[in-house]
Amino acid sequence: MGQRIDFLPFDGWVRHTFDHPAPGPEWYFDLDAPFWAGPPRLTIAYVTRLFEDPCPVLAGYTDEQLNRGFWYLLSNGLSDYMCALADASVPLADRVRCVRSFVPVFENLLAVRCTPHLSHLDEPGAGPLNLAGYMWWDIIPFGVAPTDASGRELGEAALGAMADILTIDRVACQESAPRARALAAPLADRGRTDHRRVPRPQRERPRRAPRVRAERPGRVRAVGDAVRRRARPGSARGDGAGCR
């Protein structure tokens, strides 16, 4: 088993997450790879600090390194970073702020460095960082319970973040936000006392995923409008300067 890391200064934590060779074998699959086991409150503080101001901290890493680092950071199959969002020992306000910090990392980093390609269509020429943005909301171990007040607040923060991300004029960013459907359904059904899913109407034929375009004509509108209607006021936007 790899070395257990209980504490690192912020810069060391960033290096642990992103400073690894790429392309090549994923370092985190090595059985002897070191692993972060810092306290949940510190993890949330570091993730929020990184996402609220991703530049220039991440400017020196390649797109391949960033893609792998974000997958490691976001997925509970690779690390436990984002499990801290569900940890009640972390103040709810800190967890909500962390969720809202997803907006500036999309606006200032992904919008600048992702290419104008759609990952769900496997469009050729897509940059390596596109995939992390596309799968962002899918790989986070994050859900909401309709009957839980803190869960609802976190869910509303996520929907607000998605609404803001939809306004970013980059298809690679907008493509991630329709994942809101997984969160929007339980929030819309918050009055129920059980956790059964609301039946969805059957369609005669499956429909192809909508094509998202901002740099080119067309956009995801129906889902985007639904997310914006549910979004809470306020924004966690960065300054829009971006980084390379």
Image (cartoon, helix red, strand yellow):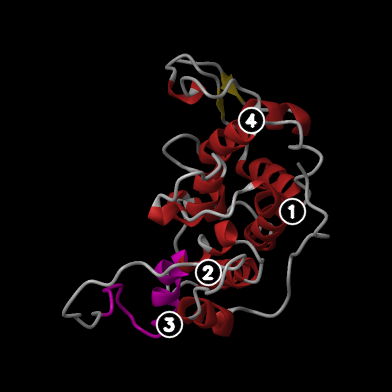
Q: Gap in Å between the C-alphas at discs 4 and 2?
A: 28 Å
Mark 2 Cα-neighbour bin, 10 Å: few <14, some 14–19, many ≥20 = many
- The amino acid marked with disc number 4 is Phe
Asked if marks 1 and 2 touch (Cβ < 8 Å), the reply is no
- The amino acid marked with disc number 2 is Gly
Please give the label number shown on residue 155: 2
As helix, strand or loop, the secondary structure at mark 4 comes to helix
- Measured as percent of width and height from the top left, residue 204 is found at 16, 80
- The amino acid marked with disc number 1 is Asn
- Measured as percent of width and height from the top left, residue 206 is found at 22, 71
Q: Gap in Å between the C-alphas at discs 1 and 2?
A: 23 Å
Mark 1 Cα-neighbour bin, 10 Å: few <14, some 14–19, many ≥20 = many
For this view, does 156 lie left or right of residue 223?
Answer: right
**Is tag 1's residue or tag 2's residue first in the polypeptide sequence?**
1
**Is tag 4's residue or tag 3's residue first in the polypeptide sequence?**
4
Which of pointers 4 and 2 indicates the residue nearer the eye?
Answer: 4
Task: Pick the residue in front: 222 or 85.
Answer: 222
Please give the label number shown on residue 188: 3
Please provide the residue range marked out in magenta: 179-198
For this view, does 35 lie left or right of residue 165?
Answer: left
